[in-house]
Image (cartoon, rainbow, N blue to C red):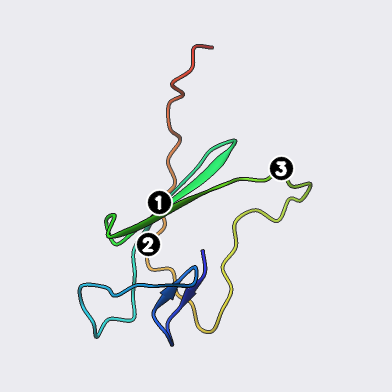
Amino acid sequence: MNYDMNFNLVNGVFYSPNDMTSMEISADIFIDKTSVEVFIDDGAYSYSFEKKNMNSDQGFYFWGNNITIKNLEVYTLKSIWNK
């Protein structure tokens, strides 16, 4: 996810939060074997993309100037496929 606070862009698309004075967004991120789905501010903006099979152990990372993660919760989702 790429969030540009200077121009209010999420992945290059203009996004305006409900509180125009806020410099914060919330993101619900679902990651599985084949895709990543992101829901910004309870679904006000959403997108998904294919997760490429990368030969890296870098994992999920954030970059930018002075990023603070206020809350991070990780859950394991139950598979819909029979095992």
Residue 52: image quadrant is: top right
Cα separation between marks 1 and 3: 24 Å
The residue sitting at 23% across, 82% down in the picture is 20
Q: Position of residue 19 (x, y in %)?
A: 21, 77
Residue 51: image quadrant is: top right
Q: Position of residue 15 (x, y in %)?
A: 34, 72
Q: Which mark is residue 53?
A: 3
The residue sitting at 43% across, 32% down in the picture is 77
Query: In the rendered view, would you say 3 is above or below 55?
Result: below
Q: Secondary structure at mark 2?
A: loop
Q: Secondary structure at mark 3?
A: loop
Q: Position of residue 34 (x, y in %)?
A: 59, 37
Residue on which disc 2 sits:
71
**Horizontal arrangement in the rendering, residue 50 relative to residue 67 (left or right):** right
Q: Position of residue 78 (x, y in %)?
A: 43, 26
Residue farthest to the top?
A: 82
Q: Which mark is residue 73?
A: 1
Q: Amino acid at mark 3?
A: Asn
Cα separation between marks 3 and 2: 28 Å
